[in-house]
Image (cartoon, rainbow, N blue to C red):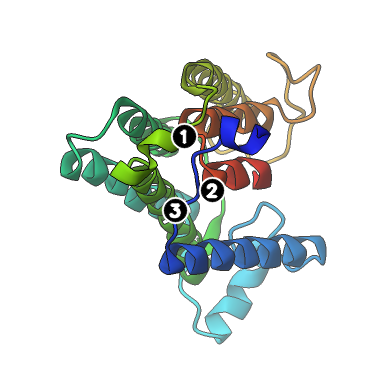
């Protein structure tokens, strides 16, 4: 059976099923809201300056984009580190997945601190929602990987091992994403806020090469994990 040759058997866990369904509904609702023009209050399409007065009237807390982005990624980074520390005797695939997720968020934090240039802001409530979404997705993916190695499931491992293909895709994706983020950061000088058409790298070939490489990165994470949850996460990305 093709499914059994690619995926680990889904763990039987009511709590995980509830979390998984909840995350799908949450992600679908966010996507529908963006399509309908109701953007989250950190989106590039959300006009921070024009909404700041309205936010003040409704007692919303505004924070800088840099602080908000750090709030997005830092909890998930520490969740990955904690998983590596708390589960030192797991198998190679588990450590590989956890290391990839941890490095993914480390790279994002590094970009926030040293690469990206921000000119706007966001609402604290939106930053907390996104941060919770990231950390729940990350910890759930790690926990499912842990459960997939339970004794009774060892004989049901995928017959096709994709983790080394996943390593290649992950490295390609994260390096390509970082490179194109660096190119974007070089387009604006200090104090500049106007939009410029990106050039260099694959910007002349692909509309958003940084997003393309991020997709490749998440498909690499799925190939490393080979769980249904990681597949759904890559597919949604």
Counting from the top left corner in percent of width and height, residue 82 is at 22, 46
Q: Quadrant of residue 110?
A: top left
Task: Check whether the beta carbons of the residues at disc 1 and disc 2 lie within 8 A of each other.
Answer: yes
Task: Mark yes or no: residue 152 visible.
Answer: yes
User: What residue sits 48% from the left and 71% below the top?
Assistant: 125
Earlier sequence position, callout 3 versus callout 1: 3
Q: Which mark is residue 229?
A: 2
Which residue bears the numbered disc 1?
Answer: 225
Mark 3 and mark 2: Cα distance apart in space: 10 Å
Q: Is residue 43 above or below residue 99?
A: below
Q: Secondary structure at mark 3?
A: loop
Q: Is residue 209 above or below residue 89?
A: above
Earlier sequence position, callout 3 versus callout 2: 3
As drawn, is 94 to the left or to the right of 191? Answer: left
Q: Quadrant of residue 58?
A: bottom right
Mark 3 and mark 1: Cα distance apart in space: 14 Å
């Amino acid at each position: 059976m093709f499914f059994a040759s690619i995926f680990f058997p889904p763990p039987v866990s009511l709590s995980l099923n509830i979390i998984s369904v909840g995350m799908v509904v949450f992600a679908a609702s966010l996507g529908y809201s963006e399509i309908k023009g109701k953007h989250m209050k950190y989106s590039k399409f959300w006009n921070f300056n024009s909404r700041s007065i309205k936010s003040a009237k409704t007692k919303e807390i505004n924070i800088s984009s840099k602080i908000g982005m750090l709030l997005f990624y830092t909890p998930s980074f520490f969740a990955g580190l904690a998983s590596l520390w708390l589960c030192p005797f797991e198998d190679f695939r588990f450590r590989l997945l956890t290391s990839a997720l941890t490095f993914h968020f480390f790279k994002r934090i590094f970009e926030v601190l040293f690469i990206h240039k921000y000119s706007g802001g966001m609402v604290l409530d939106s930053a907390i929602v996104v941060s919770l979404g990231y950390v729940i997705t990350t910890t759930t993916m790690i926990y499912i990987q842990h459960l997939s190695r339970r004794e009774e499931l060892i004989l049901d491992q995928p017959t096709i091992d994709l983790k080394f293909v996943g390593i290649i895709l992950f490295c390609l994706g994260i390096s390509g994403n970082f490179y194109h983020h660096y190119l974007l950061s070089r387009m604006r000088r200090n104090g500049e806020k106007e939009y410029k058409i990106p050039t260099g790298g694959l910007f002349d070939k692909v509309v958003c090469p940084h997003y393309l490489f991020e997709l490749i990165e998440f498909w690499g994470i799925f190939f490393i994990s080979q769980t249904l949850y990681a597949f759904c996460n890559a597919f949604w990305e």
